[in-house]
Structures are given as structure tokens and as C-alpha cells.
Image (cartoon, coloured by chain):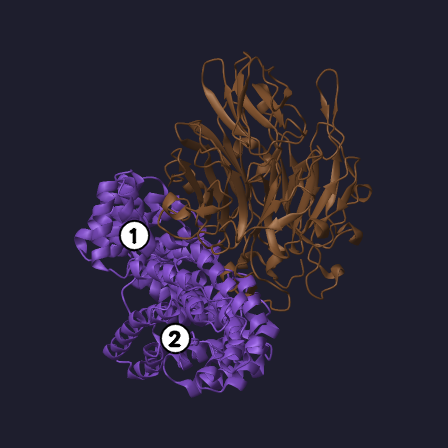
Amino acid sequence: MLAAFLLAIAGCQAPPSPREPLRQVLLPDLSRATDRVQAQLKKQYAALDEKRQHPGTSPAELAAAFGEMGKLFMAAEYRDAAEASLSNAQTLAPSDARWPYYLGHLHKARGDAVKSAAAFERARALQPDDPATLIWLANTYLDQSRSGDAERLFTQALSRDPRSIAAAVGLGRAALARSDYARAVQHLEQALALDPRAAAIHYPLALAYRGLGEMDKADAHMRQRAPGEIQPPDPLMLELEGVLESPIAYEVRGAKALDERDWKGAAVSFRRGIELAPAEASLHHKLGTALYLDGDARGAAAEFAEALRLSPHFAKAHYSLGIMLGSAGRLKDAVDHLSAAVRDDPAYVEARLRLADVLRASGQSAAALPHYEQAANIDPRLADAAFGYALALVDLGRYQPARDRLSEGIRIYPGNLAFRHALVRLLAAAPDDRVRDGHEALRLLQELTANEPRRYDVDEMMAMTLAELGRFEEAAKSQRDAIAGAERSGRPDVAKRMSDNLVRYERRQPCRTPWRGDDGPIGG
Amino acid sequence: MSGNFRYPEIMPPGVALLDYDNDGDLDVFVVQGRMLGKTAIERAIAPPRDVSSLRGRLFRNDLQVDTDGRRALRFTDVTGPSGIDARGYGMGAAAGDFDNDGCVDLYVTSLGANQLFRNNCNGTFTDVTKASRTESPGWSVSAAFVDVDRDGWLDLFVGHYLNYSVEANIRCFGLAGGPDYCPPHVYTPQPSVLYRNNRDGTFTNITAAAGMAAEFGPALGVSTADFNGDGWIDIYVANDGQPNQLWINQRDGTFRNTALLAGAALGAAGEAKSSMGVDAGDFDNDGDEDLFITELTGQGVDLYVNNGSGVFEEQSARAGLRQPTLPFTGFGAGWLDVDNDGLLDLFTVNGAVTQNVETTRRDPFPLQQRKQLFRNAGGGRFEEATDRGGAVLQAAEVSRGAAFGDIDNDGDVDVVVGNASGPLRLLINDVGQARHWVGVRLVGANTARDMIGARVAVVRADGSTVWRRARSDGSYGSANDPRVLAGLGGSTAPPTIRVQWPDGRTEEWRGIGIDRYTTLKEGTAK
């Protein structure tokens, strides 16, 4: 009935054209939306209603009203209502590409590739060269295994914008889908050349090289891969993402800005979110993070404190304050906050690891041990936890278990050289006679020097090791090389501290302090 | 279901098919949850009729087959007499005879401590979790019994999910601001665990020694098979939102994750997907194990096609599976030859994980989706056959676990589906028995246990071969029929059966009877 009425209104303004009847658009149940979002939706709906009821509303005006309503519904995830609204906008303004374009994204979000493709096709018919339309349509064709159709669209997009990474990557993916590895390599290398930082390209490129049998290149690219999605610039969707005024919408925008390292932009979004939800502790915490990254430590601390006032057991806020205080040298306060963080969330592994580090730095290595251990149990990938545990044992003079832990670390984390360096030092210079093993230290060092560039700290370890083996002249020479290397590296302070051992070697005495003063375990 | 959007509420239940009483038919075990937090059970969204029912339940299959072949299925709740006391927040189950006594044991995964129930071979079980050292506390969903070292004893892999506690529960919201279930990335993943069977009723955690400690993700699905064709069982782990792992057995007690370069870690565009259920099977009858993985709405599914050496290509779009699966969030999944034509078809059970804000008032748990059936059309192509699968497949539910097996012993694969806050569904296949089939149970030389991991080549009269394997794992938090069933189509000629046992040895049987199950004992081929 309503649709028929609307058609009648439209018919008063312009000669009737054959078109689909309008779909019924009612305000859905908004009970799950925040008050602000409800108000926003109701206001937009009232505006739409006014246009619908006003006899002088032109089809173009009504289309715009339906379209804006549809965008807001879509942003708030009322997808049925959004579809009806955008469909009406499309019916009323069939030459406006925005509405089928948004419908394409709406169907895509629902996983309906066929409807999505049809909508993007309509948008493309209206603006044949719009890069975003071409690329999203091509992607839906890839979903449907229509790689030839996809390839034509990606090619068209690339011809319009030769710097379009999304188009070049799309061509690479289409070629991969056809198992045409040579063309895939060509297109994906082109994309990578356009933006060498786009690490997400490395994965399909690795698979393309794998298909060609070039395993070294495949392996090299696989190692460089990183999460991410290559998308075309999309002004219409950017606009849509900005229409909703809910705390979570601002939080999402802020988080996106953080990902883009736009600290100021992030802070603006989080502040807008706080205006809508002043008692939401997580928004204050995120604002604090953005401020800290932007260099405003005082503002950050205030936001973290506010988050804790609102939610005293908010582990992330305790953690952030703990990190800030630790960086400022306020170790006791840092320990308090980091302890609170792990008390409130025992599985918060980063907090536990930092607590252990701060405890160690404040001379409480025994207290640090259980936290390192728990951190390693929670996340065995954390080499830092296993390493910290070993060094805390060194602090405590427990050299044998420290040696065992470092040996285990070498086995579990073969790519992490810190374990090897520390073990060499321990084997070469530990005060415990049962632990030292100069020959094993030399073997490890020879492995190290074969695989990494010569540095002053490696020269220093070599000197320690040679001294342990009684080869004092060679030790002194290595130590001199180490001192010269430190000076060349702009570390005269380190060079000065190393001179003590040089004197020792010249006197034909071995080293019994595996680490230099500030550089390592406090008990060494 | 508390109504407080606590993440673990939307993950279970898994289900298990196991013949616990060795009477030749499959019994059913299903996990149960309880209330998380302080909300009273009476205030649950779907309160139980009987609060005491909130424990894992075992149903005995009292299948009756008349002389004319007609079958009457009836199940009896034997939870109490069985001694299985699983009152944790259950997630899933794994089944396998870990002590080689010829009676299948049961491992129950949970939010909290897991439980290992030893089958006493007299219809009862004993909780041996502590003694066996397999508690593996945390949050785990899928687990698998698997003989990784070829010593003839089943080891145990437990896939762990996320670090979660009610106390540290994180609140999440939809874009309109309403509360919703969280995505997995707001929590940190837990490391999975590999236990070696010590052959004395105890297990040892060998995760680090096996080289598996430093790489893990939020595991939801586990499938074990020999993916690179070297005769040793490998382990595939499906992770939620992080790259999947393919742990290739190095034959020396260690594993190496090759998933990335093998092309089985990520989607076609290099994106880490929300992998849930997984199953391995040879859908193209080329003699190797391909992988099928269910994922989130908008992500479709992944079909990793094996080239025989453990190197895969993702071909879900090419196979016609991507487009029809994009609207669904899949959990339990399995390869099964629905129509016994010799080609493995696919079945998935679905259910969303985030609220549809538009239906909230009408339904407090609006995550329902229908199931999907895909027929293998040959030539690497699938076609959706859900509409032909009957009304039961159209019913929208919040489905999670799915266990596959021939529950009525009529020669085709049936499905038991576990639904979140809903009843179990037993889907009986009425199609497969129209064609001929061969079924074998593979048991060990020294023990009558199912030889999980054994591969079977069924050489049909026309010379074509289909490959199957004895498996219990796969799908999502579920345990499947370990018997091997292969469709023969219209052929009535007895096939030749070639078995590659888990220790690498092979045997061949000729003239195996069709349209019935035959037990093949290791070392008895003539």
C-alpha cells in the first residue's frame, strides 16, 4: 500500500517510467542499539518519512533520502532494512551509481556473491571506469571461479590507474587461480614494486614461485609475508564508515587510525567515542594509548588512570601504566601496576613478562622467576620469557640451571641468537667451575661467526673464550678488536668498560664476569 | 547460555560416535555445558528441563535388525551406569583405545580441565585423567588419538583455543552498540599439546621435544593423516583467525610445520581465516589426503587439494564450493560418500557466531543457519545438493559438532549433529544403501583395537581404486566411526582390499564380501 502511494507521489512530479515497485521500509526493532544510534536512525527515518509524505518531493530527492537511510542502516548492520532502502534509492535514481555500489558491498557482507556481482555490475554500467567498482566486481568473479572475467576487469582497472596495487594483485590472483604461475609472478612482482611495504603480496607471490618450482624465491617471499588485505581506495565506503555515531563505531575508526599510525586521528575518534560513552573504560584506555604514541605521556597517564577509576580491575590499563612508569624509572610503581594486571588477568602474558622484567631490573630476580616461567607456559613462543628466566638464574648465581635453560632455548628457538650469545658468555666466563666449557663455547662461537657479521660483542665473547682456553695473546687481540669496534660503533662507554678485561688478559688471567656491568645479568 | 554474551557459550557441543560396548553398533556421547558466571541456571536462555542433565551424556545404541533387514534404532541413556561423570563446561570429544585392551576410551575436552575416561570393557568407564596426566587444562575443543611414533600405542594431540576466564571476560559490541560475542583476536591463543603414550596408562607432554611448542594458534579443528605420503601420520590444525598448521612427522619424534609453503595455512589471497572444522579425505581418488575446512560467513570454505607430496592448492572456487558457502559460518564438516558412488561428498553444519541485530527481539539466540550437502560431481567439481537432502537439512539451528558414521549399519554414512542450546539431531542416510558397498573394521595383530591411521585401497572390479582411511578425528570437536566404508556404485564384484597399517606394513585381501562389514585383523591376509 505504502509503495503504491509513493509511486503515486513520484508520478506527480515526473512522467511515470517503468520501474520496480518500491519496497516497504519500516524502522526495525532498535532495542539492541545505543540511545545515540537509535536517535540517529529515528532522525534519518523521520527525514525520509517527511520526504515520502511531501507531495513536492522529486524522485531524485526521495532517492537521496532512501539512500542516506540505507547507508545508515548498513553502517549499523540493519542489513534487511538497508537492502530495502538502497533498492528503493536505486529504483528512484537509476542513474546514480552509488546505490547499486553500496548494495554490492551489502550483499558481499552477507556472503551472497551472486547478488553482489549483479549489484556491482549495475554500478559498473553507470560508471564503467570506477576503479573500486571494477576491483570489487572482479573479486566477486574470483569467488565464482570466473577468473577470465575477473582478469578483464582487473586489466581495465590497471589501465585506468597503472599504480593500482589492488588491480595488479588481482591479476596475480586470477593467474594463480588458472595455475598460470609465470603470469602470476609477473603481476605480483609488479604490485610489490608499486609498494614494497605491502607485505600481504608476498604470500601469493611465494605460491606463484612455488608453482614455477623456484623454491628459494618461494621460501624468501613466504618469510616476508605479513597479515593484511590489499584493497582499492574506496571513498564511498569510507564515507559510509563515518556516518554512524556509536561508541563502537568511533572505536573501530580509532583503531583503524592506530593501524595507520595516525595517532592524532585516532585520538580524535576515541574522544568522540568518549563523548558518547564517558564511562567506557576501554575507550579511555585506547585514547591513552593514542596520546602516548603521539608523545603526550601526561595525557596518556591521565586517561589510563581514568580507565582504572571507571574499571579498577581493567588489566590493560594497569599494564599500560606499568609500562609507562617502568620507562620513567619508577620501578616500584611499575611493579604495583603490572602485578595488578596479572592479578586481574592471570593469562595476560605481556603483563607477566614485563612484570618479570621490571622485577629483575629492580634486583628482585627470585621474584621474577615464577612470572617468567608462567609467561613461558602461557605462550611458549615467547623466547623472551625463556631467555629472561635463564638470565634471572644467572643473576641469582644459579649457573648450571641457567646453562641448561639456555641450551634448551637454542634448541627451541634456533633462530634467536640471544640464547647462543648468552650461553657462550656463560661457558666462557661463569664463576662456577662446573659450568665453564671453553671448547664448547668456541664451537658455538665458530657457528655464530660463520652466520652473522662480525661485531664488537662477538669479538668480546671470542676474547673471553680464548682466555678460558688459556690462549691469552689471542684473547687480548680479540679484546682490542672488540674495543676498537665499540668505539667505531659510537659506544665509547662500552669500550671503556671492556678495557678491564683487556688488562686481565694481558696479565694472563681469564674472565669471570660473563656480562659487563649494565649490559647483562646483575649478579654476573 | 547466560545471555551475557560469554564467548565459550557459542562454541560447543561436539559429539562422539564410538562402539563403547563392542556390540557392533555406534553409541553416542555428547558434551554438555552449564552456566558461566553467577547467573542462576533457571535464568538461562534455554533452561534445561532437568538441571541434573547438565553433564556429558552417553547413549547406548540398541539397534535391532529384523531378518528382513528392517532396522529399528533406539537409544538408551546409560550415562549413570557408565560411570562417565563429565560435569565441566564440555566442548568436544575424542575416541580411541589408548590402553590397547580392545575397548574404546573417551577423552572429553572442556573449558577447564579435560577428562580421560578409560573403558573398563564391562560397560563402565573410570576417570583416569589424573593418573594418565592428560588433564591439559585451559580451553580445548578438538583432540585426536594418533600413533605418531608407530609404536602401536595411540598418542594424544589436544588442540587448545584461547586464554579465557569468566573473571577476565571482555565485553564486545556490535556496531549499533548492542552487546555481542567477541571475535577470537581479543583473547590470546593457548598452546596445543602433544602427549606421548607411555604404554603404562600414563602420558608425557612432548610438545616441546616434538618441536611444536613455538608455533600455535587458536586451534578448533584437528585432522591426522599421512599428508605427504611417507607412511607416517602428520597432524593438521585448523586455527581461528590465524594461520593453520601442517605438522609433518619427521620420523624421529619431531614435527615440522610446513603449512605456509605447503599452501595449506591461509586463504587464496593470503588471509588468515577463521578455520573451524576440518576433515581430510581423498575426494579425487588420486591416492592422497585432501583437506576441507569450514570458516566464517564471508570467508567461504577452503579446499586444499594435495598433489601427493603434502603440497596443496586452494581450489574451493574452482570446485564450486566457495560461492555457496560464503553466506554460512561452518563448524562440523566431513567427507562422506552419501550415495556410495565411490566419490566423497561433503557435509557441513553451520551456525553464526555474531548476532543478527535485526532479529534480536524475536529470538534471544539468533545464530541459526541451515546445513549444507555438496555432491561430488567428479572432475574436481561439487554441486550443492542440500535441497535434495530433505527438510532436515533446511532446519536452521546453531550447529557445531558433527560426527559421521554408519549408525544403523546399513552401509551408508549417517550424521549426528550437536547444536548449541538445542537438541541433538540424528540424520539417517536413506540414499547410500541403494548402491553396493564394502565395509571393513581394521584391528591390530595383538589387540582388537581400531587401527586408527591405517589407509585402505579398495580396488574395484573395473580396476579403479578408492582410498579411505580409518579415522576417528576430524570435523569439529567430534569423534567419528573408525570403520572404513567405500561405495561400489552398481558393482557387485567383490573388491580387493589393500591395507597400509600405521606401522607402514601393507597387506592385501581379495574377495571381500560386499554389502556387509568385515573385520580385517593385521597380519592375517593370505
**How far from the left and from the top, in percent, is residue A225?**
34, 55
Question: Of residues B432 and B227, which is closer to you in this image?
Answer: B227
Tally of numbered discs? 2
The answer to the question of whether label 1 and label 2 lie on touching residues, with beta carbons closer than 8 A, is: no
Chain in brown, by letter, is: B
Q: Amino acid at mark 1?
A: His
| Quadrant position of residue B445 | top right
Query: Which of the numbered marks, if any, corresponds to residue A266?
Result: 2
Specify the label residue A221 is tagged with.
1
The residue drawn where x is 50% and y is 31% is B345
Q: Residue at x 39, y 48 (%)?
A: B260
* Type of amino acid under label 2: Ala
* B125 left or right, relative to B468: right
Quarter occupied by residue A56 = bottom left
User: In the picture provided, is A470 more to the left or to the right than A33?
Assistant: left
Q: Is residue A92 visible?
A: no
Asked if residue A519 shows in the view, the reply is: yes
Residue at 45% x, 80% y: name it: A288
Kindly indicate whether the residues beneath marks 1 and 2 are on one polypeptide chain: yes
Residue drawn at x 39%, y 75% is A266
To which quarter of the image does residue B469 belong?
top right
Provide the letter of the chain coloured purple: A
In the rendered structure, the residue with mark 2 lies on which chain? A
Q: Could you say which is closer to the camera, residue A189 or residue B7?
A: A189
B343 to A119, vertically: above or below: above
Direction from residue B147 to residue A387 in the image, left or right: left
Mark whose residue sits in front, 1 or 2: 1
